[in-house]
């Protein structure tokens, strides 16, 4: 089916890109969410601002103990990136298994977060990791925690004149992590991330896909994580992948499995 | 406003199966429509238009993409390979041959997508095992043959690669 007409803008710098943005002139990168929304008639922008030629939005680097990932980096490239594989293998493995191979080759990490798809593996793991995003606007920049940025189903805390520049993940020496998901269709029924930094006593759990937004919690020890209690904390949305009761059940099962998998991960 | 006035067209130069093509396209032109309608390469099929079924898979610079959701403008400067590019018209590609030998197709509608996805996998650095093949093909749907013969067809080609054709 043909898409509605639109103009294509191709800025080369972040400043140019920011000047192009408006309510009807929207950021475009991989198109895995935007073009589908346009085809479904949910979105009819006058112009797409292609961000793929903006160098400031790409690249992966470690900056003062923080892993900085440019917004336009594609999932397949992140899964294969040597720095991410070495410093944050749990994140690389999650990226290797999201969507399907085509989505991983087209979709960007920034687009994934900005569209706030409720079943995003990326958001669940980033929330558990305590990651944040950098947003740029003509007036300046701000940093927002992913937990606040992914504010609701298909709703991110971003103004129309703002661009997501990068994702920032604080690195921890000796961090152990596991992410497991249950999936029978295109998107997961539940995804559970568990992270452990034994040296500083930092433990995090993230649960996504069951409800409207992923949720994450901190703990003082792994023993404090009670899978049955977590099943009660989530707010499942009944849909084709299951009823509320069923989703609570699989949440408990997958929290148990994530903890069991973490046991096998050495620092 | 006249009918011709619309968003400015964009120039696209693309190498399709080894042939250079230069056109002016509408920004909204989708790669699958460009291939099928403008170039007459109808081997690539369209179905779900949601990146879920995989029948429209083509390779852009060796990477598998859903051409139903890929702007032609984004293929500028790239090498595009479609199912028509697998064979020279005389000899089948090893994957095509293996699909025939293993009865890995029935109606054939999903086959171009499975072939291109499989090519992307086998062109990678590692020769995939069965588990990797199954996982890679999870994003493609077949509604008649079933998946076993398809996985076996790809596995046989992978085994031959492992057996030393690569050296």
Image (cartoon, grey):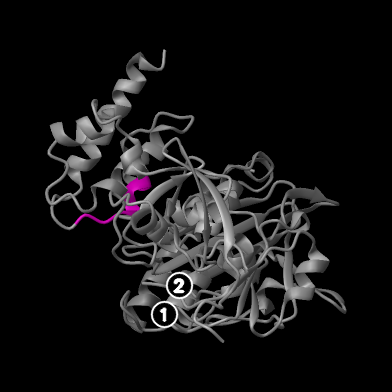
Q: Is residue A103 left or right of residue A20?
A: left
Same-chain check, marks 1 and 2: yes
Q: What element carries label 2?
A: helix
* Image mark 1: chain: A
Mark 2 is surrounded, within 10 Å at the Cα level, by few (under 14), some (14 to 19) or many (20 or more) other residues, namely: some
Residue drawn at x 39%, y 56% as measured from the top left: B38
B83, above or below A55, in the image: above
B152, above or below B67, in the image: above
Report the front residue among A164 and A226. A164
Residue drawn at x 13%, y 52% as measured from the top left: B107
Residue drawn at x 25%, y 28% as measured from the top left: B156
Pinpoint residue A101: horizontal percent, then vertical percent: 44, 51
Pinpoint residue B32: horizontal percent, then vertical percent: 39, 57
For the residues bearing labels 1 and 2, Cβ distance under 8 angstroms: yes
Q: CA separation, marks 1 and 2?
A: 6 Å
Q: Can residue A208 be seen in this view?
A: no
The residue range painted magenta reads B135-142
Q: Is residue B108 visible?
A: yes
Q: What element carries label 1?
A: loop
Residue A40 disc label: 1
Residue drawn at x 30%, y 24% as measured from the top left: B159
B64, above or below A202, in the image: above
Report the front residue among B36 and A215. B36
Residue A197 position by quadrant: bottom right
* Image mark 2: chain: A
Residue A199 shown in magenta:
no
Magenta segment main secondary structure:
helix
Residue B139 shown in magenta:
yes
Report the front residue among A214 and A108. A108
Residue A36 disc label: 2
Pinpoint residue B4: horizontal percent, then vertical percent: 52, 76
């Amino acid at each position: 089916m043909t898409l509605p007409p639109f103009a294509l803008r191709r800025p080369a710098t972040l400043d140019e890109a920011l000047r192009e943005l408006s309510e009807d002139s929207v950021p475009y990168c991989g198109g895995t969410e935007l073009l589908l929304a346009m085809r479904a008639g949910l979105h009819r922008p006058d112009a797409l601002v292609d961000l793929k030629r903006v160098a400031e939005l790409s690249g992966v680097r470690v900056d003062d103990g923080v892993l900085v990932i440019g917004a336009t980096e594609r999932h397949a490239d992140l899964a294969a990136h040597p720095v991410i594989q070495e410093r944050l293998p749990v994140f690389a493995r999650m990226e290797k298994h999201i969507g399907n191979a085509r989505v991983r080759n087209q979709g960007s990490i920034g687009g994934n977060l900005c569209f706030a798809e409720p079943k995003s593996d990326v958001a669940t793991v980033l929330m558990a990791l305590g990651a944040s995003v950098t947003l740029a606007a003509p007036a300046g920049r701000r940093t927002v925690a992913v937990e606040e940025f992914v504010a609701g189903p298909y709703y991110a805390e971003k103004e129309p004149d703002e661009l997501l520049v990068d994702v920032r993940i604080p690195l921890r020496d000796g961090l152990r992590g596991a992410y497991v998901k249950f999936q029978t269709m295109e998107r997961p029924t539940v995804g559970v991330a568990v992270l452990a930094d034994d040296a500083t006593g930092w433990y995090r759990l993230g649960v996504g896909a069951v409800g409207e937004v992923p949720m994450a919690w901190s703990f003082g020890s792994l023993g404090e994580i009670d899978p049955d209690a977590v099943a009660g904390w989530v707010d499942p949305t009944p849909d084709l992948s299951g009823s509320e009761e069923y989703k609570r059940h699989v949440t408990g099962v997958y929290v148990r499995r994530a903890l069991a998998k973490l046991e096998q991960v050495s620092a | 406003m006249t009918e011709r006035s619309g968003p400015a067209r964009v120039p696209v130069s693309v190498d399709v199966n080894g042939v250079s093509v230069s056109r002016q396209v509408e920004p909204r032109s989708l790669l699958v429509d460009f291939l099928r309608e403008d170039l007459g390469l109808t081997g690539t099929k369209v179905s779900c238009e949601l990146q879920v079924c995989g029948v429209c898979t083509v390779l852009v610079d060796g990477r598998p993409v859903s051409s139903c959701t890929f702007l032609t403008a984004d293929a500028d400067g790239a090498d595009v390979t479609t199912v028509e590019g697998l064979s020279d018209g005389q000899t089948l590609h090893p994957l095509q041959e293996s699909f025939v030998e293993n009865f890995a197709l029935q109606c054939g509608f999903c086959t171009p997508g499975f072939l291109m996805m499989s090519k992307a996998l086998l062109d990678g650095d590692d020769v995939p095992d069965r588990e990797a093949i199954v996982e890679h093909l999870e994003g493609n749907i077949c509604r008649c043959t079933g998946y076993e013969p398809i996985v076996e067809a790809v596995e046989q080609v992978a085994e031959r690669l492992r057996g030393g054709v690569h050296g």
